[in-house]
Amino acid sequence: MFKEDTLSGKTILITGGGSGLGLAMAKGFASCGADIAICGRTREKLDNAVKEIEAEKEGAVARGYTCDVRDYEAVNGMFENIVSDFGSLEGLVNNAAGNFLSASEDLSPGGFKAVVDIVLHGSFNCTHVFGNYLIDQKKKGNILNMVTTYAEGTGCAFVLPSACGKAGVLAMTRSLAFEWATYGIRLNAIAPGPFPTEGAWSRLVPDRVLEKKFKAKVPMKRYGEKEELANLAIFLMSDLADYITGECVVIDGGERLQAGQFNFIDGLMSRSKLKKLFKAMKPK
Ligand code: HXC
C-alpha cells in the first residue's frame, strides 16, 4: 500500500518513541522515507531505539531527545533543537502516556496528576509548541494523538486518570482540527485496542488469567500487531489522508462492540450449538 517515499520530505517527532507502539510507528515512518525524532525520559532507551530504526532501513535518519513532556520549557527547547538539527518539522505524534490499575478511591492526588500530566498536559505542551511553530512558519503540518477506545462514550473503571486524560486529548484533537484547519494543520487520533507492549502490559495486565480474559473479549480472538497500528499511523500522517481531520480511528479487532445487547451469547456455547438452538426456536 505504501511506497518508500510516501512520507519523504517529512520529519516526524514521536513522543515516547523509544519503545512499544511509539517505536513501531517510528520504524514504519522511517520505512516510508520520513526523518525521525523520538523523545523520552531515558537516554539509553532512546539511543537503542535510534540504532534499531537506522538498522532497519538503509539511509534512515533518526535522533533521540531526552525530554519530559510535562515540562513546557523543556518541550519548547526540544522543538528548537529538532528544527535546528533537521531544518524543519512537519509531523508530531503524541504517543507518550502513563497508566496503572487502581481502585479510584485508593488513588493519591499525586497518582492522578502524574498520569493526567503526561497524557493531557504533555500532549497539549507538544501540540501548542508545534502549532505555534507551524503558524509562525506558515507551514502545513500534521498531528496524530494516541488515545484509547475508552476515551469516548464509556470511560473506564480502574484506570480513571488515563480515562480522563485521554478524553481530554480527544476533545483537544477535535477542537483544534476545526480551529487550526485554516492554517493547514490537521489533527487526528487513533484509538488502539489491545496491542501488547512491555510498558503497558506490565502495568495493566498483571497475570495470565487476566491476559486470557483480555484476549477473549476481542471478537477476532487475537491481539493487534504493532505493524498494523503503524500502517494506520503512516496513512494518517501521509498526504494520502490530506482531507481527513478531526477523526478518531479505532483499531481494536472489534473489542469496543461488546456492548451489543445479545453479543454475550457468542461466548456461551459453540457456534454450531447456537445455530441448533436458534433453529429450534424458529416457529414451524
Ligand atoms: C497507585 C501509583 C502507581 C500504582 C505510581 N503511582 N504508580 N499509584 N498504583 N501502580 C503514584 C505514585 O505513588 C505517586 O503518587 C505518583 O503516582 C507518581 O509516581 P512516580 O513513580 O513518582 O511518577 P513517574 O515516575 O512520573 O511515573 C508516572 C507513571 C508511570 C504514570 C506513574 O506509570 C509511568 O511513568 N508510566 C509511563 C509508561 C506507561 O505507563 N506506559 C503505559 C501506557 S499504556 P504520590 O501521591 O506518591 O505523589 C496506555 C494505554 C492504555 O496508556 C490502553 C491499554 C489497552
Image: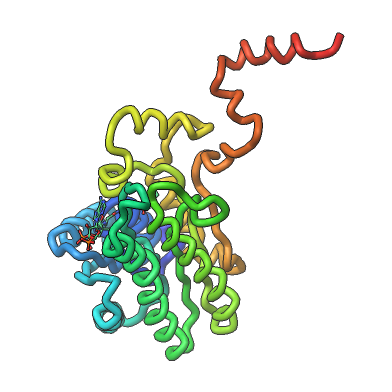
Going by the image, does 154 lie left or right of 123? right
Residue positioned most to the front: 105
Residue 68 vs 263, above or below: the answer is: below
Q: Which image quarter is the C terminus in?
A: top right
The picture places residue 97, in percent across and down from the top left corner, at 33, 59
Q: Residue at x 63, y 37 (%)?
A: 260
The picture places residue 124, in percent across and down from the top left corner, at 40, 74
Residue 279 vs 58, above or below: the answer is: above
Image quadrant of residue 23? bottom left
Going by the image, does 20 lie left or right of 176? left
Residue 8 vs 28, above or below: the answer is: below
Q: Residue at x 57, y 67 (%)?
A: 246
**Could one spot residue 278 in this view of the protein?**
yes
Image quadrant of residue 58? bottom left
The picture places residue 78, in percent across and down from the top left corner, at 26, 78
Q: Residue at x 38, y 51 (%)?
A: 159
Residue positioned most to the left: 44
Going by the image, does 280 lie left or right of 205? right
Observer-nearest residue: 186 or 99? 99
Q: Name the quarter showing ligand 1.
A: bottom left
Residue positioned most to the right: 284
Q: Residue at x 47, y 76 (%)?
A: 141
Q: How is the image coloured?
A: rainbow
Going by the image, does 108 lie left or right of 47? right
Residue positioned most to the bottom: 136
